Image: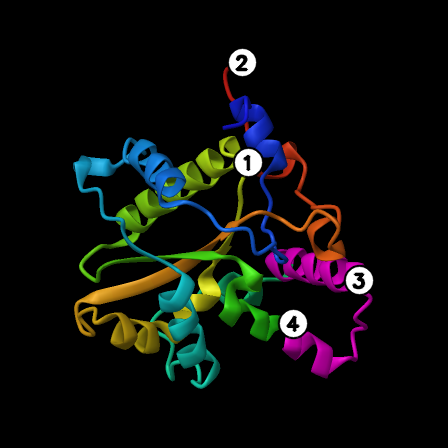
Amino acid sequence: MMSMTVSEAVSSRRSIRAFRDTPVSLETLTRVLEKARMAPSGCNFQPWEATVLTGAPLKALQDVLLASQPDDPYEYRFDAPGEREKYKARLSALGAAMYGAMAIGRGDAASRLDFSQQNLTSFGAPVLLLVHFPKLMLAPQWSDVGMWLQTVMLLLREEGLDSCPQEWMGIYGRTIKAHLGLDMDDTMLFCGLSIGERDADAPVNNFPRERVPLAENTTFLGF
Protein backbone atom coordinates (compact mmCIF):
# COMPACT_ATOMS: atom_id res chain seq x y z
CA MET A 1 0.00 0.00 0.00
CA MET A 2 1.28 3.47 -0.86
CA SER A 3 1.61 6.27 1.67
CA MET A 4 -0.71 8.96 0.33
CA THR A 5 -2.68 11.85 1.80
CA VAL A 6 -6.32 12.40 0.88
CA SER A 7 -5.27 15.51 -1.06
CA GLU A 8 -2.74 13.49 -3.05
CA ALA A 9 -5.34 10.82 -3.79
CA VAL A 10 -7.80 13.46 -5.02
CA SER A 11 -5.25 15.26 -7.19
CA SER A 12 -3.81 12.09 -8.73
CA ARG A 13 -7.14 10.39 -9.43
CA ARG A 14 -8.28 10.64 -13.01
CA SER A 15 -10.40 8.55 -15.36
CA ILE A 16 -7.91 6.09 -16.82
CA ARG A 17 -8.61 4.93 -20.37
CA ALA A 18 -5.58 2.70 -20.96
CA PHE A 19 -4.70 0.05 -18.37
CA ARG A 20 -1.89 -2.44 -17.98
CA ASP A 21 -2.93 -6.09 -17.66
CA THR A 22 -1.36 -6.48 -14.21
CA PRO A 23 -3.78 -8.55 -12.07
CA VAL A 24 -5.44 -7.05 -9.00
CA SER A 25 -5.74 -9.39 -6.03
CA LEU A 26 -8.97 -10.28 -4.26
CA GLU A 27 -7.25 -9.31 -1.01
CA THR A 28 -6.64 -5.76 -2.26
CA LEU A 29 -10.16 -5.33 -3.58
CA THR A 30 -11.67 -6.69 -0.39
CA ARG A 31 -9.57 -4.31 1.69
CA VAL A 32 -10.74 -1.33 -0.37
CA LEU A 33 -14.41 -2.31 -0.33
CA GLU A 34 -14.38 -3.09 3.39
CA LYS A 35 -13.15 0.44 4.09
CA ALA A 36 -15.57 2.00 1.60
CA ARG A 37 -18.53 0.63 3.59
CA MET A 38 -18.17 3.70 5.82
CA ALA A 39 -19.07 6.11 2.99
CA PRO A 40 -21.88 8.56 3.84
CA SER A 41 -25.40 7.17 3.51
CA GLY A 42 -28.60 9.13 4.08
CA CYS A 43 -30.90 7.28 6.49
CA ASN A 44 -28.24 4.53 6.51
CA PHE A 45 -29.90 2.93 3.47
CA GLN A 46 -26.50 1.97 2.00
CA PRO A 47 -28.08 1.58 -1.46
CA TRP A 48 -24.96 0.51 -3.34
CA GLU A 49 -24.60 -3.06 -4.56
CA ALA A 50 -21.81 -4.38 -6.74
CA THR A 51 -20.66 -7.36 -8.78
CA VAL A 52 -16.88 -7.55 -9.32
CA LEU A 53 -15.47 -9.50 -12.27
CA THR A 54 -12.02 -10.51 -13.45
CA GLY A 55 -10.50 -13.29 -15.56
CA ALA A 56 -12.87 -15.63 -17.44
CA PRO A 57 -16.12 -14.12 -16.06
CA LEU A 58 -15.03 -10.65 -17.18
CA LYS A 59 -14.06 -11.93 -20.63
CA ALA A 60 -17.42 -13.69 -20.97
CA LEU A 61 -19.30 -10.48 -20.20
CA GLN A 62 -17.15 -8.49 -22.62
CA ASP A 63 -17.84 -11.00 -25.40
CA VAL A 64 -21.58 -10.57 -24.79
CA LEU A 65 -21.32 -6.77 -24.81
CA LEU A 66 -19.28 -6.71 -28.01
CA ALA A 67 -21.99 -8.79 -29.70
CA SER A 68 -24.86 -6.64 -28.36
CA GLN A 69 -26.48 -3.30 -29.10
CA PRO A 70 -27.22 -0.55 -26.55
CA ASP A 71 -30.59 -0.57 -24.81
CA ASP A 72 -33.44 1.05 -26.70
CA PRO A 73 -34.56 3.05 -24.90
CA TYR A 74 -31.88 3.62 -22.25
CA GLU A 75 -33.05 3.00 -18.69
CA TYR A 76 -31.62 6.36 -17.66
CA ARG A 77 -29.86 9.28 -19.36
CA PHE A 78 -26.47 10.53 -18.27
CA ASP A 79 -26.03 13.09 -21.08
CA ALA A 80 -29.03 15.38 -20.54
CA PRO A 81 -26.98 18.34 -19.16
CA GLY A 82 -25.26 18.53 -22.56
CA GLU A 83 -28.40 20.18 -23.90
CA ARG A 84 -27.50 23.37 -21.97
CA GLU A 85 -24.75 25.44 -23.54
CA LYS A 86 -22.36 25.82 -20.61
CA TYR A 87 -22.35 22.09 -19.93
CA LYS A 88 -22.09 21.28 -23.63
CA ALA A 89 -18.99 23.50 -23.75
CA ARG A 90 -17.39 21.55 -20.89
CA LEU A 91 -18.10 18.25 -22.66
CA SER A 92 -16.65 19.63 -25.89
CA ALA A 93 -13.50 20.78 -24.09
CA LEU A 94 -13.02 17.29 -22.68
CA GLY A 95 -13.47 15.69 -26.09
CA ALA A 96 -11.04 18.09 -27.73
CA ALA A 97 -8.36 17.44 -25.10
CA MET A 98 -8.82 13.67 -25.03
CA TYR A 99 -8.99 13.04 -28.77
CA GLY A 100 -6.30 15.64 -29.37
CA ALA A 101 -3.96 13.74 -27.04
CA MET A 102 -4.51 10.62 -29.18
CA ALA A 103 -4.12 12.59 -32.43
CA ILE A 104 -7.64 11.62 -33.53
CA GLY A 105 -9.11 14.39 -35.66
CA ARG A 106 -12.61 15.75 -35.29
CA GLY A 107 -13.61 14.28 -38.63
CA ASP A 108 -12.14 10.84 -37.99
CA ALA A 109 -15.43 9.17 -37.13
CA ALA A 110 -14.08 5.63 -37.49
CA SER A 111 -11.26 6.14 -34.98
CA ARG A 112 -13.58 7.89 -32.55
CA LEU A 113 -16.07 5.03 -32.75
CA ASP A 114 -13.29 2.48 -32.27
CA PHE A 115 -12.10 4.29 -29.16
CA SER A 116 -15.60 4.64 -27.70
CA GLN A 117 -16.13 0.90 -28.20
CA GLN A 118 -13.17 0.29 -25.89
CA ASN A 119 -15.61 1.15 -23.09
CA LEU A 120 -17.01 -2.35 -23.62
CA THR A 121 -13.68 -3.93 -22.69
CA SER A 122 -13.08 -1.37 -19.92
CA PHE A 123 -9.98 -0.01 -21.66
CA GLY A 124 -8.05 -3.17 -20.90
CA ALA A 125 -8.57 -3.06 -17.12
CA PRO A 126 -8.18 -6.46 -15.42
CA VAL A 127 -11.14 -5.83 -13.07
CA LEU A 128 -14.62 -4.43 -13.62
CA LEU A 129 -16.87 -3.48 -10.72
CA LEU A 130 -20.51 -3.17 -11.80
CA VAL A 131 -22.72 -0.95 -9.67
CA HIS A 132 -26.43 -1.72 -9.36
CA PHE A 133 -29.25 -1.16 -6.90
CA PRO A 134 -33.04 -1.55 -6.58
CA LYS A 135 -35.04 0.80 -8.80
CA LEU A 136 -36.94 2.14 -5.80
CA MET A 137 -33.83 4.17 -4.97
CA LEU A 138 -34.35 7.80 -6.00
CA ALA A 139 -32.11 10.86 -6.45
CA PRO A 140 -30.88 11.05 -2.82
CA GLN A 141 -29.79 7.40 -2.91
CA TRP A 142 -28.11 7.84 -6.32
CA SER A 143 -26.13 10.61 -4.63
CA ASP A 144 -25.11 8.17 -1.89
CA VAL A 145 -23.91 5.71 -4.52
CA GLY A 146 -21.79 8.48 -6.03
CA MET A 147 -20.20 9.20 -2.66
CA TRP A 148 -19.48 5.49 -2.21
CA LEU A 149 -17.89 5.32 -5.66
CA GLN A 150 -15.69 8.34 -4.92
CA THR A 151 -14.63 6.69 -1.67
CA VAL A 152 -13.74 3.51 -3.56
CA MET A 153 -11.76 5.44 -6.17
CA LEU A 154 -9.72 7.34 -3.59
CA LEU A 155 -9.01 4.15 -1.63
CA LEU A 156 -7.82 2.55 -4.87
CA ARG A 157 -5.35 5.41 -5.28
CA GLU A 158 -4.08 4.71 -1.77
CA GLU A 159 -3.36 1.17 -3.00
CA GLY A 160 -1.50 2.52 -6.03
CA LEU A 161 -4.35 1.57 -8.35
CA ASP A 162 -6.48 3.49 -10.79
CA SER A 163 -10.02 3.45 -12.08
CA CYS A 164 -12.48 4.79 -14.61
CA PRO A 165 -16.15 5.24 -13.72
CA GLN A 166 -18.15 4.14 -16.76
CA GLU A 167 -21.73 5.34 -17.04
CA TRP A 168 -21.38 3.91 -20.56
CA MET A 169 -22.15 0.51 -19.02
CA GLY A 170 -25.58 1.85 -18.11
CA ILE A 171 -26.63 1.97 -21.76
CA TYR A 172 -26.15 -1.81 -21.88
CA GLY A 173 -28.01 -2.24 -18.59
CA ARG A 174 -30.53 -4.86 -19.71
CA THR A 175 -27.84 -6.96 -21.41
CA ILE A 176 -25.64 -6.86 -18.32
CA LYS A 177 -28.51 -7.65 -15.94
CA ALA A 178 -29.54 -10.62 -18.04
CA HIS A 179 -25.97 -11.93 -18.18
CA LEU A 180 -25.47 -11.58 -14.42
CA GLY A 181 -28.88 -12.99 -13.54
CA LEU A 182 -30.04 -9.80 -11.84
CA ASP A 183 -33.73 -9.00 -11.52
CA MET A 184 -34.59 -7.30 -14.81
CA ASP A 185 -37.56 -5.32 -13.48
CA ASP A 186 -36.35 -4.37 -10.01
CA THR A 187 -32.64 -3.62 -10.63
CA MET A 188 -31.01 -0.49 -12.04
CA LEU A 189 -27.60 -1.10 -13.63
CA PHE A 190 -25.95 2.24 -12.90
CA CYS A 191 -22.36 2.05 -14.11
CA GLY A 192 -19.11 0.17 -14.24
CA LEU A 193 -15.83 0.99 -12.53
CA SER A 194 -12.75 -0.22 -14.37
CA ILE A 195 -9.95 -1.01 -11.94
CA GLY A 196 -6.27 -1.66 -12.49
CA GLU A 197 -2.87 -0.10 -13.02
CA ARG A 198 -2.63 2.83 -15.41
CA ASP A 199 -0.44 2.78 -18.50
CA ALA A 200 1.51 5.87 -17.52
CA ASP A 201 2.86 6.33 -21.05
CA ALA A 202 -0.50 6.34 -22.85
CA PRO A 203 -1.33 9.83 -24.17
CA VAL A 204 -5.00 9.37 -23.25
CA ASN A 205 -3.95 9.19 -19.58
CA ASN A 206 -1.91 12.38 -19.68
CA PHE A 207 -3.89 15.21 -21.25
CA PRO A 208 -4.59 18.20 -18.96
CA ARG A 209 -7.88 17.97 -17.07
CA GLU A 210 -9.94 21.12 -17.05
CA ARG A 211 -12.11 22.29 -14.16
CA VAL A 212 -13.93 25.60 -13.88
CA PRO A 213 -12.64 28.17 -11.36
CA LEU A 214 -14.07 27.84 -7.86
CA ALA A 215 -15.81 31.20 -8.17
CA GLU A 216 -17.89 29.92 -11.09
CA ASN A 217 -19.85 27.40 -9.01
CA THR A 218 -19.35 28.38 -5.36
CA THR A 219 -20.66 31.35 -3.36
CA PHE A 220 -19.42 32.16 0.15
CA LEU A 221 -21.74 34.14 2.46
CA GLY A 222 -21.05 35.57 5.89
CA PHE A 223 -17.25 35.23 5.82
- Mark sitting on residue 223: 2
- Measured from the top left, where is residue 133 in percent x and y? 24, 57
Mark 1 or 3: in front is 1
Task: Compute the Cα span from label 1 to label 2.
Answer: 38 Å
Are the residues flagged by discs 4 and 3 in contact, CB closer than 8 Å? Answer: no
Q: Which mark is residue 41?
A: none
Q: Quadrant of residue 147?
A: top left
Whether tag 2 and tag 3 are in contact, CB under 8 A, the answer is: no
Looking at the image, which residue is at 27% across and 64% down? Answer: 188
Residue 173 in sight: yes
Q: Earlier in the sequence, mark 4 or mark 3?
A: 3
* Amino acid type, label 2: Phe
Instruction: Pick whichever, 197 or 13, lies toward us.
Output: 197
- Left or right side of 192 for 98: right
Q: Residue at x 79, y 79 (%)?
A: 107
| Circle 4 residue | 115
Neighbor class of circle 3 (other Cα within 10 Å; few <14, some 14-19, many 20+) is some
Which residue was labeled with disc 3? 100
Count of numbered badges drawn on the protein: 4
| Magenta extent | 86-114
What scheme was used to colour the molecule?
A: rainbow
